Image (spheres, rainbow, N blue to C red):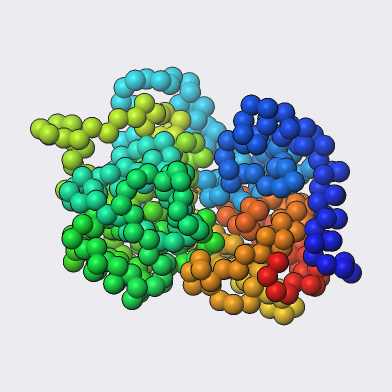
Amino acid sequence: MVRSLEAALEKVRGRFVAANPRSRAAHAGAAATMPGGNTRTTLFHTPFPLTMAGADGCRLTDLDGHRYVDLLGDYTAGLYGHNNPVIRQAVDKALDAGWNLGAHGTDEARLAAVLCGRFPALELVRFTNSGTEANLLALATATTHTGRGTVLVFGGAYHGSVLSFGDGAFPLNVPHRFVVGEYNDAAGTDRLIEEHAADLAAILVEPVLGSGGCVPGSPEFLALLRRRAGETGALLVFDEVMTSRMSGGGMQELLGITPDLMTLGKYTGGGMTFGAFGGRADVMSMYDPRRPGSVAHAGTFNNNVLSMAAGYAGLTELFPPEVSRQLFDRGERLRTRLNDIGRARGAPVRWTGMGSMMTVHFQHEPINAPRDMRPTPVLRELFHLDMLDRGFHLARRGMVALSLELGEAECAAFCAAVAGFLDDYPLLDGPR
Ligand code: PLP
């Protein structure tokens, strides 16, 4: 048995460094021209991140030749797994027809039709290049439509690289007048809305906090937001960049709550660069260029042929509503099993989430909001490096997002690995 978690971490780190000389060298080389060798902060982890050389199905191969079961699914963007032949064919076909058309293409209208057919909120939709951009445009749409300036968001929410509401003020955030409420606190949020009602343009919320630790919003909390937005004239914006996978019509369909606007991203572009925002026709028609006084929303790559083609093929051929239900159920079963494994050992481990999105937390106490989470950096690093060692790739923060390529066998193997971790490190007590 190891003496302490810190000593265990030292040992696991040493193993990681010894096993990954090529990734280490690649990272050192990249650091010469990118800050910390990095261009996407979430991918960095200590002692250095792995560099992947290839991928197929639900597996990744790193530069040193190790194979991993990919449990991260690119933070939900990789729903279709790697090299899915349907996506491949759609992209090949689009490439054969030519790109940089500088014109309307054939795929954007049919992708728009599929999305509007699936998500109750979407009467009209527009495309962007990322989820960040989609949320920026949803907020700009709301402030323009209402003529107001205040935006209610929630602590722990992540809506993009310039819309981040984790601990404390974030220096890169765009300068809207943000009011930060507490997630799942209906009474406190009600008071905040009352206080800011006159200038409230938008309430922006993830129906399940994704990056913020996979915390589902309670139906009562989300229903309150719907009701109070209507009463105050603010627009309710559901950020479904991650959660749209929860059913054929996203979380809004599961909840029976239709926001005024919503945003999409991640897998919805078939794994290509993607974002979308849309909602009520009376709001979105401000962008109708046939109308006098319409508002311009440009973007060179808004209708790029690869995203439009891959997004359409993915939604229609690979992810119809019944498949979204199956994936949801698989995730629920996996999370239940993982929690059972912790409970059987009396370990302070709690997997939160919903459907195919989940995150591990090293604590006994229940989690209803980000402020309930204990910081446990030592355990997070130990768990992450230990899982890599056992052949499972997931986020340093402990997030798992199932892809369609992951089957029962991979889920069972992951459960065995987590059980092995808990058996090897029985010192999981107190915040570390
Ligand atoms: N909204 C949510 C809920 C997200 O999880 C993310 C990304 O993680 C974004 C928006 C931003 O999307 P993108 O990374 O495509 O800008």
Q: Is 170 displayed left or right of 292 in the figure?
A: right
Q: Residue at x 23, y 32 (%)?
A: 296
- Can residue 95 be seen? yes
Q: Residue at x 48, y 21 (%)?
A: 96
Disc tally is 0
Point out the image quarter for the N terminus: bottom right
Q: Could you tell me residue 208's position as x and y percent? A: 45, 62
Q: Is 378 displayed left or right of 144 in the figure?
A: right
Q: Residue at x 30, y 26 (%)?
A: 104
- Can residue 71 be seen? no
Q: Is 311 displayed left or right of 284 in the figure?
A: right
Q: Could you tell me residue 212's position as x and y percent? A: 51, 59
Q: Nearer the viewer, residue 239 or 373?
A: 373
Q: Nearer the viewer, residue 16 or 182?
A: 182
Q: Going by the picture, which residue comes out furthest to the right?
A: 1
Q: Is 279 displayed left or right of 159 in the figure?
A: left
Point out the image quarter for the C terminus: bottom right
Q: Could you tell me residue 242's position as x and y percent? A: 47, 53
Q: Residue at x 37, y 37 (%)?
A: 128
| Quarter assignment of residue 376 | bottom right
